[in-house]
């Protein structure tokens, strides 16, 4: 990512489709204080003494967090996920939740983590930190990893003497592709997890900031405790809080052989990483939840409409600048996500540092090479666009610049090409994906 | 520690010398808001726009933190440690700083981490999480690890084909013993680090909450960039912030072979653990620093006197209840730290779950078995007392109960004993220690 940062710094006037950051006009500095006060008032109303409130803010706190009841209630109301507060560990962002989960589930060199490829860089980083072997299962030309393809990968690993212990997925409006797994694919995945005895790490931060009705989470469908649900408040509350959580209701035995929950094991690991999650981060998000009766979906109703419109704007602009016959002749395609922050463009040229620099310097538009999201290095003729951070004016301007860049780059690099050569290069367009 | 927690829960009326928590009467809930406002006002005065302030609080932030300049200034003024802000990474408590440092410095099974034994449990946890081999170097009967003993351990490891890459130390008022390393020992340690090519991880959270003038830190004495300085605001500000930092000014090469600082490598690892440190935690500690012109020592002048008095009260009570001839006949000894939160008692009986339960149940006093702080399990006839969390009345009451317990336990278990048997059992009294 260093090169991307450098380009962003060198060309500050370029429109950047790179950052997966929330739109910041939603934020208001003084709200922070209101949220904090609201949570402290709530504690007082619940009968917590002034000294108790003071200590909650100032002292070391419980390793698993002090707002687990609020999170459990919100999961039940917003997501139909019915779990006990005891199965939740509050973490320093979803990144720590990933790290704890991998550390608990992958216990030796024979254990491997499966990921869809391309996949979110955070899980690759956590796996690298722990020296965990990652096996990427490539998406097919429709941008999905079918259960058959996944099973094939599992059998291959088992034949090599390795044990696929967990699969990481972003089922809704995935980062980086924007694809969403169908309901049928979710059911098949849970069946597969039971049949081959692995856990599914479900990470789904974009659901509540997406318009319309969402498919049920894997965790809501999970009848056999096969799913560890990773939570993030970076998109639904704000990234600066660095607040996340993990739902791990799997029964395990502790060191002394007593029945326990996987969450308890994760909390033990957390005590070696960050001890406990900062009090102010927990308090401010709790205050946001309390403002709207505990429903994160209510907090984000306006944001979901906004991000939906941003995606629609980007797709409409692409359609306008590159109508079907034009896009065929240039050799560019894209998927059409109905939520989340991202979409994928397949392009007919090599996506490398030189092309990114040219795009920023000569056309004033920045994006993320899709190759950044693959477990293995290599050239991938695709780019990720993020629309979350931009105003609709900037999206219009940026897509206009982007299409000019793509047309220029396609003609510069290849000197024109026929349909045949396009198809030869095209790795396939990810669509609303199925696993 | 689970058993200790259980005992504490079962006997809530017992005086507990177990927790190493700060004294909470220093804390005032409304101060949190004042500190936050002060920092935001400071940013405005520095010319940061309202949108810039909003984004600093709400958005993803720089991985290495946004208050590094304030920390660097405080290190210079408070500790005579002169480092650039670029050599600092702000972390989620000192625990994350340890984890990042170990991950960067220990790169394979041949690398080992040296620790003084007994040592702080946080570093043992971080090492366990990363599957790092820890070699404990036992303190001698004067409660110190001499350079000769340390060198012997290094040579032994090298002879086994292993590489001692780093040594973790708490040079001032150590947790768990309360011992302090002499100036001469500090110099010898730095010489040894240069001669045997290892880095020293210096963790010293109790300096600014201890009375009187402190010896220079290892980092202040470090002329060869042999010291990675781990910082904590859990004692000097408050634990709930979970704010720490690491000073890592060692020159290294990055992946592309360009000159860089170890801090940059630590920041890369941090991006895989917590992404960045929560904004509110950074802002509130920055506000505390700004209130007193940037000096943490000024914030803590009153606390240092308080904790010094607490230690003095505990030592005076021990002296009163167990004057020299009495303590010889019972077979108990203790060290006399002049700062920090802890002191060590050597006792003439096995310190196990049964004795801790009896102490809590029959005598109403709780403490921490020293065996918890050893890298290897085993029976250790010593206990740690923490005085930080208690009022002077509770310290008086607790020491009175403790001495009754010790006298009873000594007579119950051994049925009385002569000097010879005491000496036989005595593992030596840690005094103001030298490494």
Image (cartoon, coloured by chain):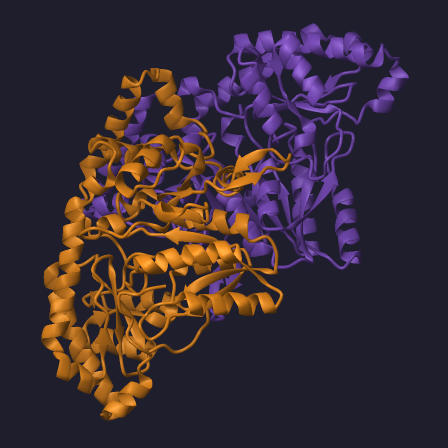
Chain colours: A purple, B orange
**Considering only vertical position in the picture, is B188 above or below B58?**
below
Question: Is residue A224 or residue B281 the one in the foreground?
Answer: B281
Say left or right for B368 vs A180. Answer: left
Q: Position of residue A34 (x, y in %)?
A: 27, 28
Q: Position of residue A99 (x, y in %)?
A: 53, 47
Q: Position of residue A414 (x, y in %)?
A: 84, 14
Taking the spot 20% from the left edge, 32% from the top edge, the residue there is B291
Say whether residue A370 is visible. Answer: yes
**Considering only vertical position in the picture, is B210 above or below A380?**
below
Quadrant location, the C terminus of chain A: top right
Taking the spot 29% from the left edge, 86% from the top edge, the residue there is B423
Question: Is residue B254 or residue B321 the one in the foreground?
Answer: B254
**Considering only vertical position in the picture, is B179 above or below A65?**
below
- How many marks on residues? 0
Taking the spot 61% from the left edge, 31% from the top edge, the residue there is A175
**Considering only vertical position in the picture, is B34 above or below B412?**
above
In the picture, residue A145 is in which quadrant? top right
Quadrant location, the N terminus of chain A: top right
Say left or right for B237 vs B243. Answer: left
Q: Position of residue B350 (x, y in %)?
A: 33, 82
Taking the spot 50% from the left edge, 52% from the top edge, the residue there is B102
Question: Is residue B67 or residue A14 the one in the foreground?
Answer: B67
Say whether residue A432 is visible. Answer: no
Say left or right for A376 vs A309. Answer: right
In the picture, residue A172 is in which quadrant? top right
């Amino acid at each position: 990512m260093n090169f991307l940062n450098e380009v962003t710094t060198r060309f500050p006037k370029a429109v950047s489709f790179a950052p997966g950051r929330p739109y910041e006009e939603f934020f208001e500095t003084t709200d922070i204080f209101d949220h904090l006060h609201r949570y402290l008032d709530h504690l007082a109303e619940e009968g917590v003494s002034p000294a108790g409130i003071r200590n909650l803010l100032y002292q070391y706190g419980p390793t698993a967090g002090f707002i687990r009841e609020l999170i459990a209630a919100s999961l039940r109301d917003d997501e139909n996920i019915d779990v006990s507060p005891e199965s939740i560990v509050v973490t320093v962002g979803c990144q720590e939740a990933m790290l704890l989960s991998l550390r608990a589930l992958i216990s030796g060199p024979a254990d491997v983590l499966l990921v869809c490829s391309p996949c979110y860089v955070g899980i690759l980083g956590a796996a690298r930190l722990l020296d965990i072997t990652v096996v990427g299962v490539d998406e097919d030309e429709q941008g999905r990893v079918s259960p058959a393809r996944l099973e094939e990968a599992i059998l291959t690993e088992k034949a090599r003497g390795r044990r696929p212990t967990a699969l990481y997925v972003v089922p809704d409006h995935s980062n980086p592709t924007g694809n969403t797994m169908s309901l049928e694919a979710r059911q098949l995945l849970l069946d597969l997890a039971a049949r081959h005895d692995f856990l599914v790490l479900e990470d789904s931060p974009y659901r509540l900031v997406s318009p319309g009705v969402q498919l049920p989470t894997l965790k809501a469908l999970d009848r056999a405790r096969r799913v560890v649900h990773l939570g993030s408040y970076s998109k639904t509350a704000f990234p600066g809080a660095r607040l996340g959580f993990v739902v791990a209701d799997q029964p395990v035995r502790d060191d002394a052989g007593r029945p326990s929950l996987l969450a308890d094991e994760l909390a033990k690991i957390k005590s070696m990483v960050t001890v406990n999650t900062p009090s102010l981060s927990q308090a401010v998000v709790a205050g946001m939840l309390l403002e709207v009766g505990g429903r994160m979906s209510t907090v984000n109703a306006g944001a979901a409409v906004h991000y939906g419109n941003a995606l629609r704007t980007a797709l409409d602009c692409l359609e306008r600048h590159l109508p079907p016959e034009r896009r065929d002749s240039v050799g560019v395609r894209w998927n059409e996500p109905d939520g989340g922050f991202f979409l994928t463009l397949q392009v007919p040229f090599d996506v490398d540092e030189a092309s990114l620099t040219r795009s920023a310097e000569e056309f004033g538009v920045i994006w993320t090479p899709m190759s950044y999201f693959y477990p293995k290095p290599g050239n991938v003729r695709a780019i990720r666009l993020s629309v979350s951070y931009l105003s609709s004016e900037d999206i219009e301007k940026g897509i206009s610049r982007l299409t000019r860049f793509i047309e220029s780059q396609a003609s510069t690099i290849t000197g024109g090409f026929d349909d045949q050569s396009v198809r030869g290069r095209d790795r396939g367009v990810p669509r609303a994906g199925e696993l």
